[in-house]
Image: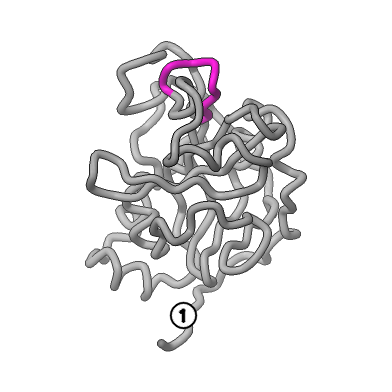
């Protein structure tokens, strides 16, 4: 397969290491906004995430470990991939110390790298629609269950620090029925690449 095409991507920041995730999920989640996520060189700037913690019922880890969520209970800095509603994959980054079972759901990206590959996978040409949702971005980046439990600082995954300042906003999470009042969704203020705008 030919390598993914590149766009005129801004200079990438330093590579994030697994130690970045070894702290509170409530610190990691907003700090991920503006970083760049690539899978086999395809991806973009993270513009929207949600935090989940085992102490609240919307988290998959709330009722303890299962074969599906076991990776959440492991050390930080690994990918947790699961199938949502039996339809699409979702990718999360495991945070906090081993046993805490906290993770950040990656909800939306601003596409920057490998646009041709993303459009081919998504059968879409609208740049704003390529990665504007957790299922859309995994399809665009080719993420499947094969990426579950992979380290976030080794190929095929690469995460890079921000290259410029961003204004982060917070709001309630989307598409859940429990703990709906928690303002644990974070995003780039005014971004056109969000899955859903934040209330003004």
Residue 56 belongs to magenta span: yes
Picture residue at 72% right of the left edge, 59% below the top: 15
Q: Position of residue 173 (x, y in %)?
A: 41, 24
Which residue is painted at 55% across and 24% down in the image?
53
Extreme residue in the bottom direction: 2
Q: Is disc 1 placed on a helix, strand or loop?
A: loop
Residue position for label 1: 5
Taking 74 as reference, is 185 left or right?
A: left
Residue found 64% across the figure and 27% down from its top = 100
Position of 197 relative to 33 (above/below): above
Which region is colored magenta?
A: 51-58
Circle count:
1
Left or right: 78, with 135 as reference point: right
Where is 170 relative to 71, above or below? above
Could you say where residue 60 lies in the image, as x and y percent from the top left? 43, 29
- Toward the viewer: 91 or 27? 91
Number of other residues with Cα within 10 Å of mark 1, as a class: few under 14, some 14 to 19, many 20 or more: few
Q: Residue at x 41, y 87 (%)?
A: 1
Q: Is residue 16 left or right of residue 131?
A: right
How was this image coloured? one colour
Which quarter of the image is occupied by the C terminus? top left
**Nearer the observer, 191 or 142:** 142
97 drawn magenta: no
- 26 or 98, which lies in front? 98
Q: Position of residue 13 (x, y in %)?
A: 72, 59
103 vs 191, left or right, is: right
**Magenta-colored segment: predominant secondary structure:** loop
Give coordinates of residue 64: x percent, y percent.
50, 24
**In this picture, is 94 found above or below 79?**
above
């Amino acid at each position: 397969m030919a390598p993914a095409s590149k766009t005129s991507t801004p200079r990438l920041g330093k590579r994030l290491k697994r130690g970045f995730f070894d702290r509170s999920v409530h610190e990691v989640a907003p700090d991920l906004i503006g970083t760049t996520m690539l899978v086999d060189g395809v991806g973009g700037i993270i513009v929207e995430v949600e935090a989940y913690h085992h102490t609240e019922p919307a988290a998959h880890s709330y009722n303890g470990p299962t074969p599906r969520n076991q990776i959440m209970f492991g050390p930080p800095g690994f990918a947790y991939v699961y199938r949502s509603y039996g339809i699409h994959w979702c990718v999360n980054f495991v945070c906090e110390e081993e046993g805490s079972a906290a993770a950040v759901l990656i909800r939306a990206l601003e596409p920057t790298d490998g646009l041709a590959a993303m459009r081919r996978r998504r059968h879409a040409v609208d740049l704003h629609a390529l990665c504007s949702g957790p299922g859309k971005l995994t399809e665009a980046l080719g993420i499947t269950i094969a990426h579950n439990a992979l380290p976030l600082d080794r190929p095929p995954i690469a995460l890079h620090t921000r290259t410029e300042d961003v204004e982060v906003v917070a709001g309630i999470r989307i598409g859940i029925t429990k703990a709906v009042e928690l303002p644990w969704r974070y995003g780039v203020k005014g971004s056109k690449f969000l899955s859903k705008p934040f209330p003004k």
